[in-house]
Image (cartoon, helix red, strand yellow):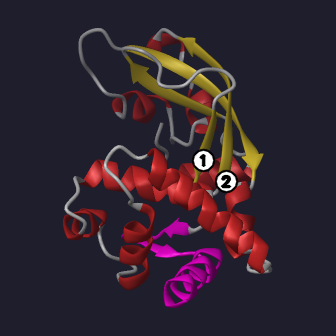
Amino acid sequence: MQFTGDVLDGIASGEVDLAFRSWRTPSVRPGTVLRTAVGMVEIIEVTPVDPSTVTDREARRAGHPGREALLAAQRQGEGRRLHRVVLRFGGADPRAAMREDTALTAEELDGIVAALDRMDARSRRGPWTRVTLGLVHDHPGTRAAELAACAGRDTLPFKADVRRLKEYGLTESLDVGYRLSPRGALVWQHIERIRER
């Protein structure tokens, strides 16, 4: 479930607490927590609605100027039904603080490297974590498709791998491409020191 930057700002400020989506099958359900550029967004309720019952006030609560603009923005197609999504801001993404944490001991750095080793060991295609980290380190702000091509990978699986590294606070998304977080840069330095031993 995607949101524009303006809507995300509204969610973070509490001005936006609804969304409307035309779905064949809802892509979220109550209890879903989404990670977004402004932090966590919690899904409270998902209800199918008749478009004729949507009010201008609800449209404004969803970040639209009015009902007609909201309905015009919905996807059309057979089998689609309009859903009202009640949501709320769930606070900062906990990974944001992790990305900035560089007060790591040698043992903690070794633990992160061991976790990367386990990810590599579980991979059917073989080791990938260091290749991916290295590409992001060497080419910050480069489109994911270009980085994936450098690794001989398809773009979508490559992006999924970068997201896995993001779970450890090692990478962060830019408007275009990625970069290593401060924590990721520290881990990368530790990996390079291990290679030199």
Circles 1 and 2: CB distance less than 8 Å? yes
- Nearest the eye: 131 or 68: 131
Q: Which residues are magenta?
A: 171-197
Left or right: residue 78 versus residue 180 is left
Q: Residue farthest to the front?
A: 197
Instruction: Estimate the x, y position of residue 155 in percent, counting from the top left.
Output: 26, 54
Q: Is residue 183 magenta?
A: yes
Q: Position of residue 13 (x, y in %)?
A: 73, 53
What is the distance, in whole Å, between disc 1 and disc 2 at their CAs?
Answer: 6 Å
Residue 181 versus residue 155 in the image, above or below: below
Which residue corresponds to the image point at 63% horizontal and 30% vertical from the top-left? 57
Amino acid at the residue labelled 2: Gly
Crowding at mark 2 (Cα within 10 Å: few <14, some 14-19, many 20+): many
Q: Residue at x 70, y 45 (%)?
A: 15
Q: Position of residue 111 (x, y in %)?
A: 70, 64
Residue ID at (31%, 27%): 75
Is residue 175 among the parts visible in the rendering?
no
Residue assigned mark 1: 35
Near-viewer residue (146 or 105): 105
Q: Badge 1, how many Cα within 10 Å: few under 14, some, many 20+?
A: some
Mark 1 element type? strand
| Residue 4 point in image, percent of width and height | 47, 51
In-image side of 172 versus 88 (left or right): left
Quarter location, residue 98: bottom right
Residue type at mark 1 is: Arg
- Which residue carries the number 2 mark? 39
Residue 32 lies in the magenta-colored region: no
- Snapshot quadrant of residue 102: bottom right
Q: Residue at x 44, y 59 (%)?
A: 162
